[in-house]
Image (cartoon, rainbow, N blue to C red):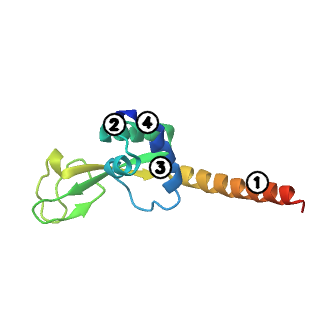
């Protein structure tokens, strides 16, 4: 099955399933690899999830001169260690789960677990 045939909503499921354990920003390439969704489609869906408030953009800079990495940039994108001005090739787009969405998923999961447990008890006649 080609990656175009893989439903893009798998990205949503991946984000929801990993919302509680993703402490560091992630690359859309990871999402594409783990879901089988084409990289371009995974990137577009992650950007849509930013608009939905589930994800936020994180820009990571990497200095090819001194191998320094950082995530916060001022108006210019020069390395804080060596001063080298970076090109767009040295800037990487990552995504992070928003605290609000992480909290929502955690609350939803706990409600689902309680509901599932109570349904199991009812079926068992307890």
Look at the numbered disc 3 and give the secondary structure of its residue: helix
Residue at the spot of label 4: 48
Q: Are marks 3 and 2 in contact (CB under 8 Å)?
A: no
Residue at the spot of label 1: 115
Work out whether residue 41 or residue 108 is closer to the camera in this orientation and state it.
41
Q: Earlier in the sequence, mark 3 or mark 2?
A: 2
Look at the numbered disc 2 and give the secondary structure of its residue: loop
- The number of numbered badges drawn on the structure is 4
Q: Are marks 4 and 1 in contact (CB under 8 Å)?
A: no
Q: Residue at x 33, y 39 (%)?
A: 38
The Cα atoms of the two marked residues, 2 and 1, are separated by: 38 Å
In this rendering, the answer to whether 64 lies above or below 14 is: below
Residue at the spot of label 2: 2
The Cα atoms of the two marked residues, 3 and 2, are separated by: 19 Å
Q: Earlier in the sequence, mark 4 or mark 1?
A: 4
Q: Nearer the viewer, mark 4 or mark 1?
A: 1
Residue density around tag 3, few if under 14, some if 14–19, many if 20 or more, within 10 Å = some
Residue at the spot of label 3: 14
Q: Nearer the viewer, mark 2 or mark 1?
A: 2
In this rendering, the answer to whether 52 lies above or below 114 is: above
Q: Earlier in the sequence, mark 2 or mark 1?
A: 2
Query: Percent x, y for residue 95?
Result: 38, 50
The Cα atoms of the two marked residues, 3 and 4, are separated by: 14 Å
Residue density around tag 4, few if under 14, some if 14–19, many if 20 or more, within 10 Å = few
Q: Quadrant of residue 43?
A: top left
Q: Residue at x 39, y 51 (%)?
A: 34
For this orientation, the residue located farthest to the front is 1
């Amino acid at each position: 099955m080609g990656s175009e045939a893989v439903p893009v909503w798998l990205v949503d499921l991946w984000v929801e399933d990993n919302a509680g354990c993703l402490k560091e920003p992630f690359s859309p390439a990871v999402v594409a690899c783990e879901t089988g969704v084409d990289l371009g489609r995974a990137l577009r869906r992650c950007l849509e999830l930013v608009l939905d408030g589930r994800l936020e953009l994180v820009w990571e800079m990497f200095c090819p001169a001194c191998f320094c990495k950082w995530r916060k940039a001022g108006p210019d994108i020069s390395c804080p260690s060596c001063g080298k001005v970076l090109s767009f090739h040295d800037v990487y787009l990552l995504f992070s789960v928003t605290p609000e969405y992480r909290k929502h998923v955690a609350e939803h999961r706990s409600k689902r677990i309680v509901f599932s447990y109570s349904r199991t008890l009812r079926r068992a006649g307890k």
